[in-house]
Amino acid sequence: MELVSQHVKGIMEECKLRARDHGLTFDDETLEYIVTNRDMIELSPKVMIPTLYDYWVHDVRVLSGKGMYEAYPSNPYETVINTRPAISFYNDNNPDWLNVMIFYHVLGHIDFFQNNFFYKNTWDIDLTGQALSDKRLIAQFRSEKGRWVDYIIEFSRGIDNLVGYQKELNQYIMKDTRQRLSKADFYFDIFLQRIKNISHHEYLKEITRYNGIRKTNEDFFVQVIGRYPEFEELYKKEISIKAKPDQDVMEYVLRFSPFLKEEENEWIKSVIQIIRNTSLYFQPQIRTKIMNEGWASYWHEYLFMRDDRICGHETDFAKVNAAVTSMPKVGLNPYALGLRLFQHIKNMEDKGCYSFDYMFLNDEAGRKKYDQSKNSGAQFVLKVRENFNDFTFINTFIDQEFIAEHDLFVAGKRFNNSRMTWEFYIKSKKAQDYKEMIIDTLYHPPEIFVDKASSKKGILYLNHKFENKPLKMDFIENTMVGIEYLWGGPVHLETSEPVVSGKTATDHANFWDPGSSKTKGKKPEPVKWKRMIYVMENRKLSKREL
Amino acid sequence: MITLDELLERDRRREEDGFKRKIRIGRIVKPGSGGKDKIIIVPTTVEEKFIHDDIHLNQEPGEGDPTGGTGEGEEGDIIGEQPVRPEEGENGEEGAGEGPGEGEGGEHELESNAYELGKVLSQDFQLPNLKDKGKKRTLARYVYDLTDKNKGVGQVLDKKATLKQIVETNITLGNIPDVSNIDMTKFIISPQDLIYRILSREKDYESQALVFFLRDYSGSMGGKVTQTVVSQHVMLYSWLLYQYEKQVETRFVLHDTEAKEVSDFYKYYSYKVAGGTKVFTAFKMVNEIVERENLARDYNIYVFHGTDGDDWDKEGKQTIAEIKKMLNYVSRVGVSVVEHSYVGSKQTEVEKYLKSSGILNKYGNLIKLDVMGEEADDSRIIQGIKRLIS
């Protein structure tokens, strides 16, 4: 692993200047390293953070990554990690023109990391440094406690998708306004001005009354409540929004686990904390894959085409670019989808289509011709990259125009019994269906929280909020073994399961005859659900209906 | 970087600590020219978490998961198809198959499918009572070591061998006119002179095993029961194929009122007749084969028998006698009784006489019985295998 040559660094710095001219913003400092493909394989299980803590599952992934590489060699162009300064990795055999393209792509990523609001919790942390000190701490524990450190890492990682990322992010955003709102502040700043909308004259009168009463011992609010009986209730509501929300499962275990309270288990808390922080750090990245890749592709295409340093390599570029950003006939390519959606948003905004006038326009021809020449698209996409994540991005901007423009559709796959084939067909060309299909692929961990009312007598009671999906059943046992260990007592999990009538619900194909179980088809009945409770005690799992 | 062996050792220790094993051995197939695929062994593991199951409950039968697509066409248009199986073949075997794989495929397909399945099962079991019995056939596992030498490229430079090779080359080139006064500056070093150690597969010799599969194929074995028995034997067979790189020998015996040996697993699982049932005939045939071919000397012998528990010999006198004879040489007899659901909670004949004879207790280390219902699912069947070979 070494830094890129001065010549290549020069290309990067030049790219930065041009990218800034078009509105991208990022720190001055970046680090570019040349790595071998082998290094990449070793880094990828550590989410490309060279200083991440050691863990045997990473080693397993490296070993299988090496096998995979032997069978199917690949040559990744770049990887960027969200650190300060931003670090990016390249393999060394790129010609200058290709580096120009790759650097623009990388700058797109860096701009995204440093401007998208969902990354706010990562902006003040030097991750490589933090990870290094975590790694050292874990190494030290390992020398004292041996393989038990790895069990703790395993069990903690078993629940590291249940971290309250949104809640944490909310706190970051509210940081500046977090001091407790006093009754008087609420009354004068919010209640009178925003809720009651009273006149200046009355407002000043109230202030005078307040100042007058401060000298005596009277309660100012007696009269307020007399006049506005709802005041007390509204204040409580406002406070409850500002108050610290519930702890996530990891926090709860850290705080209340009887097992972790014992002095000799103090070190375990540090390990759990490390796993939790690491998970929180990567949450925004998982939730902005389509946007992040789309944004980077959008800019490498846009800036590359306007760069005079690459004259004569337009066809080379077209070839590489097409390989990265073409839409597959069947399947999804997040780079391509995100790129096209950003382009679409820019065009729509340029024409002023995000307006009521356009929305109420019912005739197709009129819609096609509609053009207000607002030309505000460039500014608008910058705002989008700042304030959206994959879900809101997809949900807001995929419209029928987008589907039509790119001939998109939901591809269905069904079994053809007579020909013994899987048939691919156009299932739907409706924007709504396409949207739902994409949203279904997005990261969405189950919402599981500690039910404090039921967590009594040493039991940790987890409640899984029902969202029309069951938990993956064969993962439940080991996950709960881990939680029980960390909790030091029985763990209950309340969740929903589909009721199956008679037949076992095997969704996977029959081993011997993939068609058989699926072909004798009647229309399936709507799924019924039942509430189940899983009980983990002394490493034994049992379940019953609730 | 940790090695595969260390990983497996760590995995073994998990059991001592009271946790389940987590590492499985997977394979990646590297497609090669002329059908010679190369198989690369890699460890795999799953990190369990609470996650949503991706099943689509409201999907129509025969419908796969939807995905994105792009191109011309209207809703409902078919844009392409993909065969369910790589190849189709009629089987010309006698007797309609009853087991899985009914009416399709051929032996080849079974082997490859079984191999895949064995891969999945591989970490779950280990043969019991394995003893060292000579080296006629090897029951091979493989270890990986840097033993093979290779010119030009490789993992570690073998300095001594390289030096030798350079000297040899230069002797041929005439660069060493006087052996007592060698001028190394005149040496010419070809890239081909560099000799490297490369990773190579070494056989690790172990005792050899011979497995007899016995199956009742009488009239009463209709439907699910046969499927269940065969599924279990398929899994056992698959696992053996995979784990021992096809080095385990297998023999197949079917019986109704008479026993007959068949040549391969395909026949074994697909044959069906409509006769009565005499269980002892199968055990007797195994005893005869072992004696005739003097197999007990060279092999660890395992016998697995699958039946619905029906036997004309209600007391099981002959069967018990044959089994007792067998217990003198086998490493394990595993009997699976799959009950018809109409039998209810009544014990079947085979189960009854095996229990009352007391051999299950007396020779508990050598003979195991597993009784399950015909509705048993895969996990129950695997559990059964564990019981039989534990």
Image (cartoon, coloured by chain):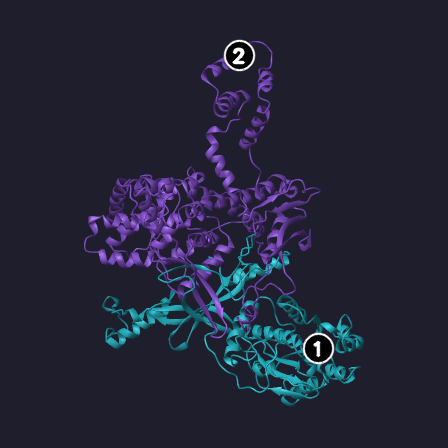
Chain colours: A purple, B cyan
| Quarter of the rendering containing residue B380 | bottom right
* Residue B130 visible in the snapshot: no
Residue at the location (50% across, 29% down)? A178
- The image position of residue B92, as x and y in percent, is 53, 86
The nearer-to-camera label among 2 and 1 is 2
* Residue A61 visible in the snapshot: yes
Give the residue type that dot 1 points to.
Answer: Asp
Q: Is residue A252 left or right of residue B345?
A: left
Numbered tag placed on residue A235 in the rendering: none
Location of mark 2 (residue): A209
| Quarter of the rendering containing residue B178 | bottom left
Disc 1 crowd rating (10 Å Cα; few below 14, some 14-19, many 20+) is many
Q: Chain of mark 1?
A: B
- The image position of residue A114, as x and y in percent, is 38, 40
Location of mark 1 (residue): B308
Q: Nearer the viewer, residue A236 or A352?
A: A352
- Between the C-alphas of marks 2 and 1, the distance is 94 Å
Q: Examine the rendered structure and indicate whether residue A430 appears above or below residue B104.
A: above
